[in-house]
Image (cartoon, rainbow, N blue to C red):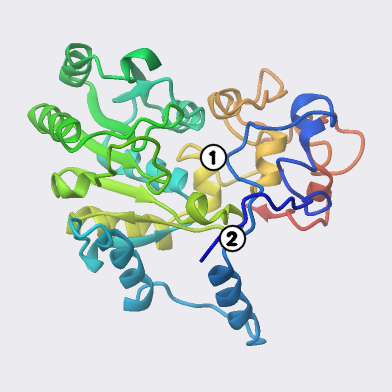
Amino acid sequence: MRYDFDRVIDRMGTYSTQWDYAADRFGSADVLPFSISDTDFAVPDEVMDALRARMEHPIFGYTRWNHSDYKGSVAGWFARDGASHVDMDWVVYSPSVIFSAATVIRLVSEPNDAVVTLTPMYDAFYGLIEGNGRELVAVAQASAMDGYGLDWDALEVALARPEAKVMLLTNPHNPTGKVFTAGELARIVELCHANGVFLISDDIHRDMILGETPYTPVTNITREGVALLCSASKTFNTPGLIGSYALIPDDDLRERFLFELKQKKRPVEREYLGDDCPDGGVSLVLRVCGRACGLYSRQHAGAQGFPCRQSARDPLCGAAGDLSCLDGCLGPGVGCDRAPAPARRGGPYWHHVG
């Protein structure tokens, strides 16, 4: 199909994080907000047609993802290049790539272990790594003039550290856009295997390629000690639909991941609060409310860019009766100006757990 990239679509009034809440994030609504990774391009007609067809059925009950239609569509998408194979058994659903990365990190490492990653780095990785009690070890990439190449010696030293248990990669790299060659991926895998480091590859931008280097999924290189995380949300501009998937070839790790997904804490709670969130007291979380009001431990809130204005005595904002950071979530007169309007008491994002 021919796509019209010149069509202008007004997104104001749709609760768009990018447009409706620019003032909350930048202090002024009179800005062009380029800091969030969705686009202003319309969803493809094929996606809209599929959504409309489903919405014709008037019941939206519990549904399953664990079937060949869902997993086969993921495997088929990877197979389009004629060189990649994804076994449908590897495919698992996840609410988000960040949830998947945080969960896998917890499953393959212990608190105070180190996670190696490349800089510059996707900003959410700071909170993801440090908020789960892991040490962040950064290896700098070369400049744009040098093609964002890797310092292989520095990477080898970082991965050889005894506490290094995970490498968190993005391919194509976020934010540089660098697409790693098959040879570069093979060398990264070789270094990880030599040092017993588990490799997580966030490939959410896999369909957005600049330059001549073709995208290679790391599962083409190895099926051991690896998990590939992805979503259709960037390719088709559907992040508001919420959903992603992971490719986990290892049977045991995949089952443990599914246990975390289905049978432990609720995915949203774990994504934002991590393992150290107490279940008692007032635990309020659900995307807008949680992000805006800082319902994280201190390292979660600070790393995510939401200063948690909690009392010094309370290690978790809102967990033990100190609700000074929850204006907009709990109602007037409590002191936080970060919460967008929909997060008011009784609004669509209000959720109480615990």
Q: Which quadrant of the structure image shows residue 325?
A: top right
Is 109 rendered above or below residue 231? above
Q: Which quadrant of the structure image shows residue 168?
A: top left
Q: Secondary structure at mark 2?
A: helix
Residue under label 1: 273
Is 63 rendered above or below residue 261? below
**Mark 2 residue type:** Leu
| Camera-nearest residue between 20 and 339 | 20
| Camera-nearest residue between 40 and 295 | 40
Which of labels 1 and 2 is toward the front? Answer: 2
Q: Residues within 10 Å of mark 2 (few under 14, many from 20)?
A: few
Q: Which quadrant of the structure image shows residue 117?
A: top left
Which residue shows up at 32% across the image and 33% down it?
169
- Please provide percent x and percent y for residue 233: 51, 53
Is 66 rendered above or below residue 300? below
Which residue shows up at 57% across the image and 40% down it?
37
Q: In the drawing, does residue 165 fall left or right of residue 327?
A: left
Q: Secondary structure at mark 1?
A: helix
Is residue 338 among what the camera can see? no
Mark identifier at residue 241: 2
| Camera-nearest residue between 204 and 324 | 204
- Please provide percent x and percent y for residue 49: 59, 76
* Farthest residue, direction front: 2
Mark identifier at residue 43: none
| Camera-nearest residue between 345 and 88 | 88
- Please provide percent x and percent y for residue 202: 36, 41
Marks 1 and 2 sit apart, C-alpha to C-alpha, by: 22 Å
**Mark 1 residue type:** Leu
Looking at marks 1 and 2 on the same chain, the residue that comes earlier in the sequence is marked by 2
